Amino acid sequence: MKRLVKIALGLAFLGSLASAQDADSAAEEAAERLRDATNMLAIAERAQNRVKALTETVRAFEDGLDAVREGMRQAAIQEQALSKLLGARHEEIAQLLGVLQTIGQNHGPVLLLHPSGPLGTARSGMIVSKITPALESRAAELRVQLREVSTLRALQESASGTLERGLLGAQEARSALSKAIADRTDLPRRFIEDTEKTKLLIAAAETLEGFASGLSSIAIDEVSGSLPSIADRKGALSLPAEGRILRTAGEADAAGIVRPGIVLAVRPFSIVTTPVPATLRYHGPLLDYGNVVILEPQAGILLVLAGLDVVYGSIGEVLPGGSPVGLMGGELASEENDTLLIDQDDQKGAQRTQTLYIEVRENSKPVDPEMWFQTNEG
């Protein structure tokens, strides 16, 4: 009898796990966010400012896909926890079901006879009468949890389809954004790029500092003056892409290389935007930084963004705040690389497989970017 009590108390732990209804609700919310993003894509195609509308659409897809991935992760964690617990208690559950089946099939004095006589029989009968409802209750909870395992598995399959459709929608939105930027002709220009001098500057540059110091030489007919000061926004600028700081300024990487900027871990194909209105001083390959975007929000300040896969815009243009300047790279999603790594403690961090390097230069000297950007770190 003590064994049955232990079984019943052990099974009570099952009821403390999160309900599949919560996962179902989160999955529906994530799917709704992707449906909203799809609707935004249709509207953006007709918007007067298509670049702005499509930028917001791409971000909406990114948020929706994040929600789907997180929902799949949570469902997988719950399903795995339930399956492990049920597997670990297989023997006890079998005993419980056997006792309940015996009690249900046998009625009469024989079942309750006790070797010690009538008093023992009476006592055992009282104990069984008290424990039986508890056992039946735990058995009912067990049936519910088994159904939840099935529900969670079905949710993962459904979310996988939602993820695939969302990825296709996001790809369509990014393609539309690239075309809208290429077709854009209404932005003011600070200067015209001298392409020959740009090539010479790239060939001669041995460091980012040397390249940045020569940027003024590639400008033809540059408009005098500067954009409005951003000094009042120091420490409050939004990061160019949603992410998490992987390395701080001055922190050595795995190869022992130390750079004065920060490295941001971001999701594949993340859109990168300028945090403030800025002149596009340069974009393209540079040294060992990959594709680089250099922005000048005001005279004497340069924002350097490196590691992009695709870059947008035309050198010399004045870009509005929040304007896309490029996309990160990455692999196309698959069941292996874009869904479940449920053994990771921080799945969101684990999925940020791309790195964006951010450097800020004031009067030709690098400064800690965390002085300018709102990073929410520490």
Image (cartoon, rainbow, N blue to C red):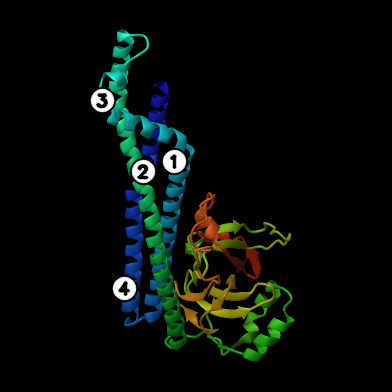
SS at mark 4 in the image: helix
Query: Which of the two residues, 300 or 318, is positioned nearer the viewer here?
Result: 318
* Residue 363 placement, left or right of 157: right
Q: Which mark is residue 86?
A: 1
The amino acid type of the residue labelled 1 equals Leu
The amino acid type of the residue labelled 2 equals Gln
Q: Earlier in the sequence, mark 3 or mark 1?
A: 1
Residue mark closest to the camera, 4 vs 2: 2
Mark 3 neighbour density, 10 Å: few (under 14) some (14–19) many (20 or more) = few
Q: Earlier in the sequence, mark 4 or mark 2?
A: 4
Mark 4 neighbour density, 10 Å: few (under 14) some (14–19) many (20 or more) = few
Mark 2 neighbour density, 10 Å: few (under 14) some (14–19) many (20 or more) = many
Q: Give the labeled residue for mark 4.
A: 39
| CB atoms of marks 3 and 2 within 8 Å | no
Q: Earlier in the sequence, mark 4 or mark 3?
A: 4
SS at mark 1 in the image: helix
Q: Give the labeled residue for mark 2.
A: 145
Compared with residue 374, is residue 318 higher up or lower down, i.e. above or below? below
Residue mark closest to the camera, 3 vs 2: 3
Residue mark closest to the camera, 1 vs 4: 1
Q: Is residue 342 something one can see in this rendering?
A: yes
The amino acid type of the residue labelled 4 equals Asn
Compared with residue 330, is residue 258 higher up or lower down, i.e. above or below? above
Question: In which quarter of the view is residue 36 placed?
Answer: bottom left
| CB atoms of marks 2 and 1 within 8 Å | yes
Q: Which mark is residue 107?
A: 3
Query: Which of the two residues, 73 or 114, is positioned nearer the viewer here?
Result: 114
